[in-house]
Amino acid sequence: MVKEKSFKHVLVAVDESEQGQFALVNAIHQAMEDQARLTIVSVFEPESMNVADLLDHDSVEDAQKRVEDNLQTWAKQAEKAGVEKVDVIYADGNPGEVIVNDVIPQSKADLVVVGAHSKNNFARQYFGSQASYIANRAPISVLVVRQAHDKDE
């Protein structure tokens, strides 16, 4: 008989998008279900900034601080929900690559939860998303969550 898998360490990739928040809620649920450690990662993407902001040191620092502040807010949300062991990881770069190559080995997680897509960007959805990159290359189980939307949206 096949037995369900329970996880000891859930990693969740979160950003400010609705899908990122949906990933967080589902990762919190899974961590609670399995009484697992939860690690929340958010990746600062310099490429997402315009050139003028990238050249302005204060703009870059402000954007990085927002990511770090969000991580603390999301950790408090998980703790308030009842997750006992919560860690955060801040990283820079391409989210898919950083999560697969650096964060998963560093955290030693056995499940990664990601939103189906993070930003409303047609090219990413059409040509492949960070979620697809992670799902195809991660050495651990991957849960890709998608928040259903009404057909009219």
Image: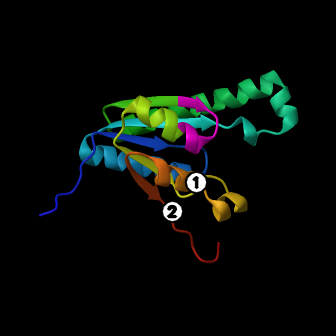
Circle 2 Cα neighbour tier, 10 Å, few/some/many (<14 / 14–19 / ≥20): few
119 or 134, which lies in front?
Answer: 134
Q: Residue at x 41, y 52 (%)?
A: 142
Q: How far apart are the alpha carbons under marks 2 and 1? A: 8 Å
Q: Which residue extends farthest left? A: 1
- Counting from the top left corner in percent of width and height, residue 124 is at 67, 57
- Counting from the top left corner in percent of width and height, residue 109 is at 36, 38
Q: Is residue 70 left or right of residue 114?
A: right
Q: Which residue is mark 2?
A: 147
Residue 55's place in the image compared with 22, above or below, is above
Q: Is residue 87 left or right of residue 95?
A: left
Looking at the rendered structure, the kind of residue marked 1 is Glu
- Counting from the top left corner in percent of width and height, residue 28 is at 38, 45
Q: Residue at x 64, y 77 (%)?
A: 152
Looking at the rendered structure, the kind of residue marked 2 is Gln
Q: Quadrant of the C terminus?
A: bottom right
Total marks in image: 2
Q: Residue at x 51, y 62 (%)?
A: 147
Q: Quadrant of the N terminus?
A: bottom left
- Counting from the top left corner in percent of width and height, residue 51 is at 85, 36
SS of the residue under disc 2: loop
The magenta segment is: 90-98
Residue 21's place in the image compared with 123, above or below, is above
Colouring used for the render: rainbow
Residue 124: give its label. Answer: none
CB atoms at circles 2 and 1 under 8 Å apart?
A: yes
Is residue 93 located in the magenta-colored stretch of the structure? Answer: yes
Is residue 37 located in the magenta-colored stretch of the structure? Answer: no
Q: Residue at x 57, y 34 (%)?
A: 70
Choose top left, top right, bottom left or bottom right for residue 68.
top right
Q: Which residue is mark 1?
A: 18
